[in-house]
Image (cartoon, rainbow, N blue to C red):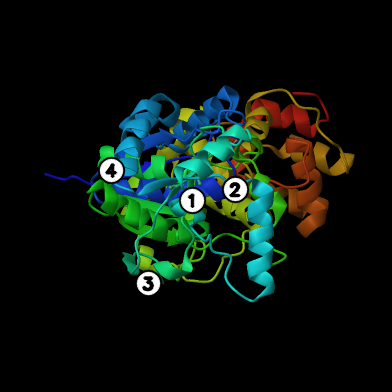
Amino acid sequence: MNNTKVRFAPSPTGYMHIGNTRTAVFNYLLAKKLGGKFMLRIDDTDTARSKKEYEDALRDILLWLGFKWDEEARQSARMSRYDEVVAKLKAEGRVYACYETAEELEVMRKRLMNKGLPPIYDRKGLSLTAEDIARYEAEGRRPHYRFKLEAGIIEWDDMVRGHCKYDAVNLADPVIIREDGSYLYHLPSVIDDADFGITHIIRGEDHVTNTASQVQMFKALGAPLPVFAHLPLLTGKEGKLSKRLGSLGVRELRAEGVEAMAISSFLAKLGTSESIEPFYDLDALADSLDLSKLGRSQPKFDEEELKIFNTRYIRSLPYEKVAERVDVDKEFFDAVKGNLNILSDIEDWKTVCHQKIKPIIEDKALTDLAASLLPPEPWSAETFNIWLNEVKTQSGKKGKELFHPIRKALTAAENGPELKILLPLIGRAKAYSRLLGEEA
Ligand code: GLU
């Protein structure tokens, strides 16, 4: 039986951006590649910042990308489960109360840093007497809770970073519950991953130190350790992590005509040793996934590059992949696709071929002559060349002087698909009228 289960765990505190979309892409593709399940977990423990509107938008983008999930969970619905685990860990001495205020912790942190020491919590909370606690409570302080790390080396094999090793001595016991009783991300994430049987976790390398603590949390819960993969973070084209990048909305890209598969193809190969090529379905892209091809350096993401790739993607699209969306036949699609920047540009060519347009007459004598020489239908593959040669001979014009006025009369545009391909799609009646300058 295949037990593989991979999850994407966004916090609904904002819209999907290119960074978390990339995480979703890798997780989904890995689930697919391994023939496992894909789970959506809504990390909404931060009730102040989590919004339904963001969650709806997030689901909408995931479905648009084609990432259907087999299972879902939401952290806000699992609080009693977290409380139960915390009670057990408290009883085992792995979770302990601390009473320092944020200001006191900051002073301690600065003091250590000034001495050139790592800012590691001194575990004062572990040695508080009942009187200390009573005094703090009387002062109106409320405890926050930390997870106690065990001494020793923490190790895991990372699918991107290789063998990772941390000495627990260099890590501070992570705070898992705030003063107001709310959970921080760390422990609930591990409880969920353990309870739901998550086998692989792909996330940004900003989580690497969290992973070190979480490895011990899995152990404390008696749960098997998932396989981890930490992706190097994307940077903006200016080299450093750009704010704009974090907020570059996938909704906006979609509205601008960037295709779902273009985004997945692009993000799945960015920063790998492979070239970025168009993939037309997720199965094929998943088959090609190889996390060991990801480099360790932070790849640059450039929105313009994605848009250029999107155009390349559209111009190479096999008709069958878009037939339902374009409402034209294969002949038409193949004729115009080389001129599309985004898929909806096809509407312009549908108008040129099937609707009325106002022609642009640049050289009336030439286009009148072209109209008079237009052969009767039916046309063959040779008709266009025969016709144009005749216009050329009788007008004495050639090259741009010949093509340009005819193109503008037939299409009212400067550029476009080859006239030879367009003319039969426009048909004789329209072509004739347009050459004469009539709206048709
Ligand atoms: N909600 C966390 C985040 O968005 C999930 C991290 C994880 O994958 O464990 O950063």
Q: Which residue is mark 3?
A: 165
Classify the position of the N terminus by image quarter. Answer: top left
Q: In the displayed image of the protein, which residue is found farthest to the front?
A: 131
Judging depth in this view, the residue of 167 and 384 nearest the camera is 167
Res 244 visible: yes
* Pointers 2 and 3 in contact (C-beta within 8 Å): no
Measured in 3D between alpha carbons, the distance from the residue under mark 1 to the one under mark 2, in whole angstroms, is 8 Å
Q: Secondary structure at mark 2?
A: loop
Mark 3 residue type: Lys
Q: Which residue is mark 1?
A: 125
Judging depth in this view, the residue of 31 and 47 nearest the camera is 47
Measured in 3D between alpha carbons, the distance from the residue under mark 2 to the one under mark 4, in whole angstroms, is 31 Å
For marks 1 and 2 on the same chain, the one whose residue lies earlier in the sequence:
2
For marks 4 and 3 on the same chain, the one whose residue lies earlier in the sequence:
3
- Binning the other alpha carbons within 10 Å of mark 2 as few (below 14), some (14 to 19) or many (20 upward) gives some
Classify the position of the C terminus by image quarter. Answer: top right
Percent position of residue 379, x then y: 54, 37
* Pointers 1 and 3 in contact (C-beta within 8 Å): no
Mark 2 residue type: Glu
Q: How many marks?
A: 4
Q: Secondary structure at mark 1?
A: helix
For marks 2 and 4 on the same chain, the one whose residue lies earlier in the sequence:
2
Mark 1 residue type: Gly
Query: Would you say the beta carbon of the disc 1 residue lies within 8 angstroms of ligand 1?
Result: no
**From what the image shows, is residue 3 above or below residue 111?**
above
Q: Residue at 36% x, 71% y: name it.
A: 162
**From what the image shows, is residue 123 above or below residue 384?**
below
Q: Which residue is mark 2?
A: 100
Q: Residue at 62% x, 44% y: name it.
A: 340
Q: In the displayed image of the protein, which residue is found farthest to the left?
A: 1
Measured in 3D between alpha carbons, the distance from the residue under mark 1 to the one under mark 4, in whole angstroms, is 28 Å
